[in-house]
Amino acid sequence: MDVTILYETNGAAKTDYQVIENKDKSIAQLVRTLRKMYNSEQILFCFEDTGVYSLPLACCLSDNTLSYWQVPAIEIKRSKGICRGKSDKTDSKDIALYAYSHMHKFRPSSLSPKSIQKLRILFAEREKILRSLSSFERTKENQDYVPKEVFQCVTAINRSVLSQLHKALKLTETKMMEVIESEQQLKQKSELLLSIPGIGMQTAIYLMIATKAFESFDNWRQLACYAGVAPFPYQSGTSIHGRTKVHPLADKKLKSLLNMCAIVAVRYDKELKAYYQRKLTEGKPKMLTINNVRCKLLGRVFAVIIS
């Protein structure tokens, strides 16, 4: 792990660079060294959000009650302006400079509760199992084109693998429900989410994962932006008059789940069904109306959770 320490001396900014192992022992040693040099209130750790690879650092800082700022890599990259070349050393310096120059945007990061961390890794495991199931089920497509004698050599293997995958899928979903049932707050929130027409169990679970049990977003508009369903204008002066549209930077999984929820909602929810049909009658595009329904669902989500 590459570390750049940015500090001021006589009004001038200076940097120190070092490389440490991304392990608890090395990170703890770095923390102890910095605490000897500075007060805890003077130290701010800033690093890219790299998922599981940044987790040891986040855990260590959280255990030591130190402030840290976990920033999406693309935000740091786009803040650098024109740059040529790339190395871990320059990247670590860029992160330090980003933290120094963007303190007005600082919002302390925090670890997800252990229950949310468990749900996250179980949900990811479920997604991998579903992809494997889809892949192995496609073996049947060869049955009508390959000679029977040839296809039989793989039938037993395919059937065995599919059986194991179905068992693993069921076990994973059971474990997810056990995590939810073991914590009253998660259980209550999941029940509230499931009371919304169109919201299913997997969407409810992913909503709690993405929002850290609804602690990381202040309102539904912020979540809509994160999910990629919030529309933004595209215009400038008198020459550019693009249509208002959603941005491709989004949580694609959440966006996909919300799309399925919206399709179900316009079938079974009387209010949303009437809204959907009215907008189509007015000549609004189908996908624009579906996106509006997705936003309405997120509004309902925050309404039931916050109430």
Image (cartoon, grey):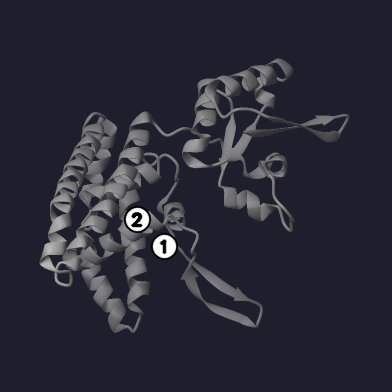
Q: Is residue 80 above or below residue 213?
A: below
Residue 53 in percent (x, y) is at 51, 37
Quarter of the figure with residue 230: bottom left
Q: Position of residue 240 (x, y in %)?
A: 62, 80
Tell me if residue 102 can be seen: yes
**Labels 2 and 1 touching (C-beta < 8 A):** yes
Badge number at residue 298: 2
Q: For the C terminus, which image quadrant? A: top left
SS class of the residue under badge 1? loop
State the residue at coordinates (82%, 35%). 13
Q: In this picture, is 91 found above or below 4?
A: below
Q: Amino acid at mark 1?
A: Val
Q: Is residue 204 above or below residue 16?
A: below
| Residue drawn at x 15%, y 62% as measured from the top left | 151
Q: Which residue is mark 1?
A: 229
CA–CA distance between discs 2 and 1? 10 Å
Which residue sits at x=54%, y=29%? 57
Quarter of the figure that contains the N terminus: top right
The amino acid pointed to by label 2 is Leu
Give percent across and percent down for residue 294. 34, 62
Q: Is residue 307 visible?
A: no
